[in-house]
Image (tube, rainbow, N blue to C red):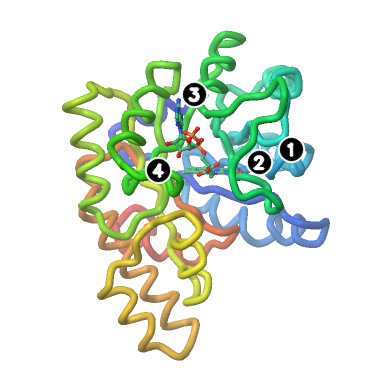
Amino acid sequence: MRIRDLYDRPVPTISFEFFPPKNDAAEAALFADTVPGLKSLNPAFISVTYGAGGSTRNTTTRIVQRLRDQCGIESMPHLTCVGSTQEMLGNFLDEILKLGFENVLALRGDPPKDQTTFQAVAGGFSYATDLIRFTRSRSKICIGAACYPEGHVETRFKHQDWDIAAQKVDAGAEFLITQMFYDWSDFLDMEDYLRNKKNVKVPIVPGILPFLNAAQIKRFTSLCGSKLPTPIRARIENYTDDESVRQLGVEVCTEICAKLMNRVAGFHFYCLNRVQSSAEVLRNLGLAT
Ligand SMILES: Cc1cc2nc3c(=O)[nH]c(=O)nc-3n(C[C@H](O)[C@H](O)[C@H](O)COP(=O)(O)OP(=O)(O)OC[C@H]3O[C@@H](n4cnc5c(N)ncnc54)[C@H](O)[C@@H]3O)c2cc1C
């Protein structure tokens, strides 16, 4: 099933994102606990991230296969340019096509931990747009890409980054999923720019991260350059326990989704391989029982 088509349905298209489990025990727990819990929420698809330099290549592929073949859930691998030549990227694309996958999320990827700036390998790509163009030149696979309501962390001007989102669509991306954000006006500004100034027609899907604890959300927002609005930060500072912060994450994400529900084709939950918070947001919105 092409994900672009899933976004045409009259109901909000709900998806979740997994990171590849670090070991066999974590993978067993993911499939024993998290997947059944998320499946009961009726997701349209689950995507699985791709680690630096292809470090999770085999796990990413195995998890998307297990989700689709054993659990009956549409799934999509991510692919990044980090540490990979065009030949390596082409091999990955050939492999997923051979396995029958119809979708891929094409990204540049973050610099590996030992590098401060992104360095393309010789014979590799510097930008996601190059990977999207390359992917499109090889196949008709449905391509998704990332976009950034507040601008990418390496960009000084968010409009420049929004222009790049439009270039990704011109290169072949058929849907865009956003970085996490906690001020919906950032999403609305980017959406307005892409729709009205750049004539972007593809679905622009909010990426929703219901945070689990204070240290985590401070780290994530600082790493990806997203704002944690002052009222939310102040409430987090007032709590001394993780559960209160988790509940705040549910409240904040419910509010963002409710605000945007009538104008977007779906929501992509960065669920952090957990069920509870995403399920609570969806129930609050009346999108799950
Ligand atoms: C939905 C989603 C899923 C993700 N999944 C993963 C994953 O699985 N694995 C992973 O490692 N990371 C993942 N990331 C993180 C992502 O890889 C990082 O944000 C990365 O730093 C940028 O990737 P990109 O595809 O947006 O890159 P790009 O769009 O290529 O942008 C990277 C930087 O280059 C600049 N740029 C782009 N094109 C040009 C150009 N032509 N000229 C000059 N500058 C340019 C942009 O402004 C930006 O600052 C994900 C992010 C999102 C939002």
Provide residue 235's location: percent of width, then percent of height.
32, 81
Query: SS class of the residue under badge 3?
Result: helix
With 176 as the anchor, is 82 left or right in this view? right
What is the distance, in whole Å, between disc 2 and disc 1 at their CAs? 7 Å
Along the polypeptide, which appears first: circle 4 or circle 2?
A: 2
What is the distance, in whole Å, between disc 4 and disc 3 at their CAs? 16 Å
| CB of mark 3 near ligand 1 (< 8 Å) | yes
For disc 2, the neighbor class at 10 Å (few under 14, some 14 to 19, many from 20) is many
Query: SS class of the residue under badge 1?
Result: helix
Q: Amino acid at mark 2?
A: Tyr
User: Are discs 4 and 2 less than 8 Å apart at CB?
Assistant: no
Identify residue for label 2: 50
User: Are discs 2 and 3 less than 8 Å apart at CB?
Assistant: no
User: Are discs 4 and 3 less than 8 Å apart at CB?
Assistant: no
For disc 4, the neighbor class at 10 Å (few under 14, some 14 to 19, many from 20) is few
Instruction: Determine which of the numbered discs, if any, sits on residue 195 in the image.
Output: none
Identify residue for label 4: 155
Q: Amino acid at mark 3?
A: Thr
Identify residue for label 3: 129
What is the distance, in whole Å, between disc 1 and disc 3 at their CAs? 18 Å
User: Are discs 2 and 1 less than 8 Å apart at CB?
Assistant: yes
With 96 as the anchor, is 139 left or right in this view? left
For disc 3, the neighbor class at 10 Å (few under 14, some 14 to 19, many from 20) is many
Q: Amino acid at mark 1?
A: Gly
User: Can residue 70 be seen at all in this image of the molecule?
Assistant: no
Query: SS class of the residue under badge 4?
Result: loop
Identify residue for label 1: 54
Residue appearing at x 38%, y 80% in the figure: 236
What is the distance, in whole Å, between disc 1 and disc 4 at their CAs? 25 Å
| CB of mark 2 near ligand 1 (< 8 Å) | yes
